[in-house]
Amino acid sequence: MFIRYFSLIFLLMISFPHVSFALECSRNLIDEGQYLLDTPGRMALRDDGKYAFVLDTSAGNINIISTAEKEILRSITISTDELTGIAINTTQQRLYISEYFSGNLHIINIQGEAADFYLESSLTLDASGLGAMVYDEKMQRLFVADSGDNILVLDENLSQVSKIPAIQGGQLIYELLISNDKLFASFETGGVLGVYDITQTAPSLITRVAVESGSTGLAAVPGTNKIYLAHTQSNKLSIINTDTQVVLKTFPDSKDILSNPIGLAYLNGHIWTANQSTDTLIPVDTEITDVLSTECSVGSRPRYLLPSHDNKLYVSHSQGVDEIIVSGQASFTTWIKGASSPFLSTLAEPEASLDILIEGGVGPFTITTMAGMKAEATSTDKRQWTLTAPILFDQHQFTVRDDGNGKMQTRFIQVGSTPVLTPSGPLSMLLGQQELLSVDGGFPPYFWTTQTGVLSTSSGKQTLYVPRVTGADTLTIIDAMGASVRLDIVVQNELAITPLLAVMLPGEERDFQGLGSSNYSWSALLGGELSSNEGERIKFKAPETTGEYQLFLTDPATGKKVSAIIYVISTELKLTPAQINLERNASQTLTITGGHGPYTWTTEYGSLSNTHTDMEGSTVVYTAPKLATNDTLTVRDSGGRKTTTEIEITGSLRLSPAVEFVSAGGNIEFQLSNAVGETSWQASSGVFQSKSSHQASYTAPHKVGRYSLIASDDAGNIAQAQVVVTSSEITVSPAQAMLAENRTELFLVQGGVAPYSWSTSMGSLSSFEGRTVFFTAPQCPMATTVDNQPEVNITVEDGTGKVTVAKIQVTCSNELISDYDENNNQTLERTELYHATGDYLQGNLSDEQMDKEITLFFLTLP
């Protein structure tokens, strides 16, 4: 339940639902009155914007729309044939209309008011399948596509001037567009865009541009050399440079919104797309060349779009014609380029680059960053930015400000990744088995805990897990920033020996234990000596001759028998090279000899090319961590024998303490060693009161939570520490304790808000949730001294992210120094405690001295 990062992100996501669009749309249905439309088709707009015209394709009518009244004023019957194309001559106030089957062309005079419009003339061409049309105002001529994919060139009175020959083998031209003295033709099949030079009296083909198949709508971006092309079949759009005739970009929209796009139109910095499958209009921001999140609902199966002068679009669809009013919205949204939803927070690697897009608002925009994050605007309107994540492992925030209206948004980047456990489980195991577990991602260092099993190490990237009791177990990996991953383990109740496999030197002794029964019978028929043939635990002495041996265990009650394999070897494990010095992120090949394979390789921080090798002499490539910190590499053979090597990372910085708990506003003195040149200190929050090349005085923030700080030197070496600011509103009891190894203590949390989550840096917990848990202290390391006895931090976090900690001192010494140990058996007996109690009641012992005696008594209970 470490919600500082993960649950916080979730809360943010539900607090900012996907409702803030870059543009807003309102829809008005054009009133058809008595002029019911059968099949609305292509449209045109008179240059003053007063009237729009829509073809009724199957009825053979041209319908006149009053843009002010939002209604059809009248209808002019043209033909009983299918009407397909429409173009407008703004100079002479004429409409040109084509018929598909008959080859007829018509001129409608649109001067004056709607009542004055009339059919001026008609002409039958020696052609059929007439379709898309466009009028060239500059050269005063009309281009008309026919079914043979020819383009007819006519003058303003429909006299044929020339013909541009077919280029696509009889495929129908869908759309014609004039932009920058060139004519563009899209084809519904064939994957080609025709480009023609129209600066001469006789236009000619310039080139065929290879594009996606199924090309339909075309639209130009005024004042630029770019046009957009819709690909209905593949749900994509293309951008073409009109000067070079090169496809600049073909893209599916990053938000997966486009669905059968067909008609295109430009309006106020956006290319609008008719989305046939979803009955919506979708805008593309021409500055950032990406689809925006706005979806404007329109009638069924929209096909053709007509832009107006006053932020309006007209849409013809199967049910009629809509007027869409487009308006900007004061709010804005922030996206990561390529994402499918607005940007609230994201994960990133250190120094990774993120392309940020800003939709809506007024602009221009300013991005303010913290903790080493960098932001650079990459577009003139400052809607596109490149953010560079800081090197500091933590959650960082940046602020986006709309300078046009002062509105602001705060967004988050979490540097690092969530930890991933391999295997991911659940696991089913037998007593005596072992399993190598590995973690990747997250924030090192990592801490491992288990409720009932045994771990080869409680920190590092890998650990070996061995069950010690049957039933359910839970293993937890916790990184330095509190993120956790849990693994459920089921240990089955079977007769077993632990260890199941052992590797021993000649004459060496070791313990073997029976599991899963109450009666045991041992035998070693092939060689070796047993300390006893009965009992739960026995000692086995290896023969003097190398080879493979077996140790048998029998349950006399059931007759069931199991065996352990014992390899007697001649040489101990040896890792070559024994000492390693590496630069950060550098690699070294290592070789293992001796012992008995297969071999298991583990490391604290670095990475390995393989964690398992089979044969003696096998090699593994070790890669040093990116952060400059020394590492330990361990190799275990099949019987658990191990050898380790310390890896010195050149230029390693030493930052102490590496993890520290402090109250709100508390002070911490950090010491730094091995720095090269000057030192730079950074913190995700909090203040450095003083800084030097070797130390810094840091004041923690007043807000509870987990924070990171780093020190870097002139050589680029980096050291990182974590600070946990605890809360006085939540307490744990006892806050301090002294426990002997494997001893258990009950802990209680008070205050705060449920649910509560528990974690520990060493040892095991009876549960990871609830108000109370039992903690079992870890076993002491082999070489423990009075000065290096384990210290354990037990952390509890409530449902709002408040944190507190209990500090546990594990005592590993059996030399209990007490004046009341009268029989000198290094154990404080009950009668000896009574003597101490009597002295205390008589005032001969202080509270502190009595606490010590009571502690010693409980530490030595059998």
Image (tube, grey):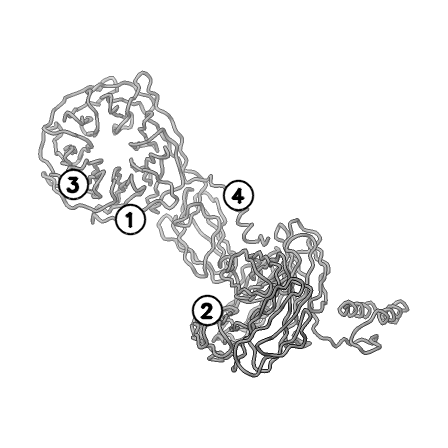
Q: Which residue is rendered at x = 14% and y = 29% of the image?
A: 128
Label 3, label 4: how far apart the Cα atoms are? 52 Å
Label 2, label 4: how far apart the Cα atoms are? 40 Å
Q: Are marks 3 and 2 in contact (CB under 8 Å)?
A: no
Label 1 CA crowd tier, 10 Å (few <14, some 14–19, many 20+) = few
Label 2 CA crowd tier, 10 Å (few <14, some 14–19, many 20+) = some
Q: Are marks 2 and 4 in contact (CB under 8 Å)?
A: no
Q: On the image, which quarter does residue 669 sit in?
A: bottom right
Residue where numbered disc 3 is placed: 168
Task: Classify mark 1: helix, strand or loop.
Answer: strand
Instruction: Answer with mark 3 or mark 4, whichever residue precedes in sequence.
Output: 4
Label 3, label 1: how far apart the Cα atoms are? 23 Å
Type of amino acid under label 4 = Ile
Q: Nearer the viewer, mark 3 or mark 1?
A: 3
Residue where numbered disc 4 is placed: 14
Residue where numbered disc 1 is placed: 249
Q: Nearer the viewer, mark 2 or mark 4?
A: 2
Instruction: Answer with mark 3 or mark 2, whichever residue precedes in sequence.
Output: 3
